[in-house]
Image (spheres, rainbow, N blue to C red):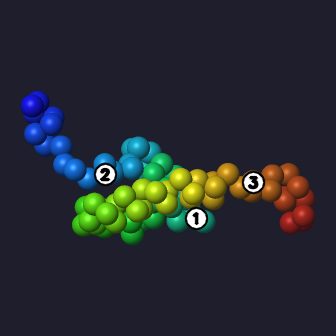
Amino acid sequence: MTEKDLWKRNEPDSPCVKICMIHPKERLCTGCLRSIEEISIWSQLSPEARRTLMQELPARQAAFKKRQGGRAARLKKT
């Protein structure tokens, strides 16, 4: 058993990828896709709650794939 194994817990790791920026409209971290509330309570969640949240995260990626409108949207505003 290595020292790394000694400290390993049987629970999901954090989804944090150390790219921490909260999207102003979606209110999600653009790195891990969690909300500020989810990030702040992560250490208090049960392993089951963490696993459930981890399964939900990939679906949130679609919020960042939507086009913002580009040139066509800017022209409509004038």
Earlier sequence position, callout 1 versus callout 3? 1
> Tag 1's secondary structure?
loop
> Tag 3's secondary structure?
loop
Looking at the picture, tell me which residue is in the foreground, 46 or 30: 46
Earlier sequence position, callout 2 versus callout 3? 2
Looking at the picture, tell me which residue is in the foreground, 32 or 73: 32
Earlier sequence position, callout 2 versus callout 1? 2
Image position of 31 (left or right of 5): right
Mark 2: amino acid = Pro
- The mark total stands at 3
> Circle 1 sits on which residue?
26
User: Could you tell me which quadrant the C terminus lies in?
Assistant: bottom right
The residue mark sitting in front, 2 or 3, is: 2
Looking at the picture, tell me which residue is in the foreground, 40 or 45: 45
> Circle 3 sits on which residue?
67
> Which residue sits at x=57%, y=57%?
59
> Residue 54: which numbered mark, if any?
none
Would residue 16 be visible to someone looking at this image? yes
How many residues crowd mark 3 within 10 Å: few (<14), some (14–19), many (20+)? few
The percent coordinates of residue 28 (x first, y second) are: 51, 61
Image position of 43 (left or right of 19): left
> Circle 2 sits on which residue?
12
